[in-house]
Structures are given as structure tokens and as C-alpha cells.
Image: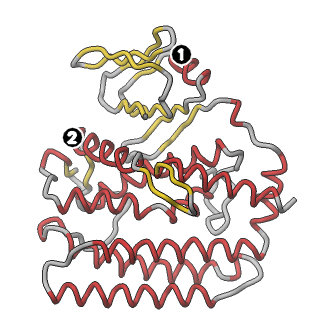
Amino acid sequence: MELILNTFGTSLSRDNEAFVIVHKDGKQRVPAQGIKSIQISRGAQITSDAVLLAIENEIEVLFMDKTGSPIGRIWSPKYGSVSTIRKGQLSFTFSHDAVDWIKGIIRQKIENQQALLLMMQPSNNVDEQRVKKAISRLEDYRSKIASINGEIVSDVAATLRGWEGVASNIYFETINLFLPEELRFAQRSQHPATDVVNAMLNYGYGLLYARIEGALIKTGIDPYIGVMHRDDYNRPVLVYDVIELYRVWVDFVVVTLVAQGVVTDEYFSVKPDGSYWLEALGRRVLIQSFNDYFEEVITQKGITRTRGHQIFLYAQDLAQTFKRFN
């Protein structure tokens, strides 16, 4: 369970072994047991006693910006990393194994995109043919990625970024076929979003960034040591590598909401510069849908757990991989 405080004036305090949320509609007492994280946006408040209760119960506290991305984090010192993980992480980054790892991530990302396109129902035969063609083109890029090689990631990084970018353009262009015409978008736009669908995707990816960064920290991995993403100063670049495995989960949530026709003008606002931002209703619906989807139980590699826990299990496996490189 996540506590989300993203309404202006909301406050969080402590009452013995429980949190007390005070907002404009009243007061709510929530036991600390069972809470995984607390997410706080601008305009909300948290007391030091509530922070200490979170630390005592190994609940991460995240401070979020208006795009849903974490800009600060408080976590329990019990998460601490052993030196063998971080030393091995550095060695892994400059090994040939890292080339295979990042190739595998990008190929899995494209396979996930293909699977999502196959799940959706085209509205007519013309669109069905376009979807089939897109899936075939994506398979071509998966094959190209499999065939490329290099001694270290920097040998192939530029080529991989180029192929990954083209594949993503094909994918998002095809995703548009499943959206209401009035909500289709010209291209992916990030900072800022130029339409409501991209605003929802950006916010969803921000929530996912927070989950992945938290999983890496809890398993002793340094999120600031990336493999393909290595050049962004003071950014958790390993999160940018790992997130590619799971972006499709956000895509599914957003596309499903938009295709259902639930998005209204109350979900977003348009600023004078033409940028789109999610408002309280849009954030609330997206966060609830995101959390519901991530609490669904699925099976990966023979292990049946919630989607959120599957990310943690992946981080655990990655930590063990790094330890072997000492």
C-alpha cells in the first residue's frame, strides 16, 4: 500500500504506530504496518514524527515533483549496501557481459511492445494490417540488436540508442490506432508534454522511476552507476536502464484508460506555452489505476508475485550478478 499526498494542504502526522492524514474532507488514521511507501507532492506536509515512524518500519518517503518523478527520498539505514555489490557493479559496467545485458533489456522492451500491440483490437482491416506491419518492423530491430557486438557498452551504445529510438517511434505511432481520434498525438513529448496522453505517460513513468529506484536501493545497488546511461551528472542513471523492461506496464494502464473514454477536460490543464499538465482528478485516477495494476499477481520465471514485487525480485537477481564480478 502506498500513501499518496498530492493535494495542497494535506498533512501527515503520527499517532503511536499509525499515520494520521488530515485533508479538507476530514481525518484518517492508517496503521504503519502494510505501507510500502509515502509519496509527498508540493503543498503537502509531513511531521518529523511521521518520518521517524516511516524509518522505523522501513517505509520509504519520496518527495515528488509535478510530473510524478521523485526529487528526494528518505529511506531506512537498514537498506545498506555491502561493498561487494558496488565494487562488482563497477566491474560489470565495463565488461562484455554488460553488452549482453543491455542488448537483452532493449530486445525485451521491444518484445513487450509487440505483445501490447497484439493484445489491442484494431477497429478495421486497414488498421489490422498496419499493426501487423509494425510488429514485423519491430522484429527486424530485435534481430539487428541481437547481431551487434562490442567489447564494452560504449562500442555499441550509439547504434543501440538509434535503433531503440526508431523502434519506439514505430510503436507509439501504432499505439495511436487504438486511441480515440481526438486524443491521438503526433509524437512522444516529454518535457513538456504537448498533449494529454503524453502527460499521462510521463506521470506514469515518473511513478515507475520511483518504484525501480526504491527496489535498487533496497537490494544494495547504487542507482547512480548506469550501464548504457552513464553521462547524466547526479542522476540515478541505472534506473533509466532498468525501467525499459517495465515501461510497457505504464503504457497499458494509460492506453486502457484513454481507450475507455474516461479522460475529460477535468483531467488536465493547458498552460500558456501549450504544455499539458495533469490536474488533481487526472493524477488521482492514474495513480489508483497504476497501483491496482501493480498489485495484480503475475508469474515471471516460475515465480508468482505482484508486478511490484517482481521488480524487487529482478533487482535482487541483479545484485547477485554484480557480486559475482568482484
In-image side of 231 versus 177 (left or right): right
Q: Which of the pair 43/113 is nearer the observer?
A: 113
Q: Amino acid at mark 2?
A: Leu
Give the residue pinned by disc 1: 48
In terms of sequence position, does the residue under pointer 2 or pointer 1 come before the other?
1
Mark sitting on residue 281: 2
Q: Position of residue 119 (x, y in %)?
A: 30, 72
Q: Which quadrant would residue 317 be assigned to in this image?
A: bottom right
Q: Residue at x 61, y 77 (%)?
A: 103
Q: Which quadrant would residue 218 be assigned to in this image?
A: top right
Q: Secondary structure at mark 1?
A: helix
Q: Secondary structure at mark 2?
A: helix
Numbered circles on residues, count: 2
Q: Position of residue 227 (x, y in %)?
A: 67, 66
Q: Residue at x 50, y 83 (%)?
A: 163
Label 1 packing within 10 angstroms: few (<14), some (14-19), many (20+): few
Q: Residue furthest top?
A: 16
Task: In the rendered view, tell whether residue 235 sits above or below residue 173.
Answer: above
Q: Position of residue 56 (x, y in %)?
A: 61, 21
Query: From mark 2 to mark 1, how far is it between C-alphas?
Result: 29 Å
Q: Residue furthest right?
A: 326
Q: Which of the pair 39/64 is nearer the observer?
A: 39
Q: Which quadrant would residue 87 be assigned to in this image?
A: bottom right
Q: Which of the pair 201/56 is nearer the observer?
A: 56
Q: Quadrant of the C terminus?
A: bottom right
Task: In the rendered view, tell whether residue 16 sits above or below residue 277.
Answer: above
Mark sitting on residue 183: none
Task: In the rendered view, tell whether residue 212 sits above or below residue 64.
Answer: below
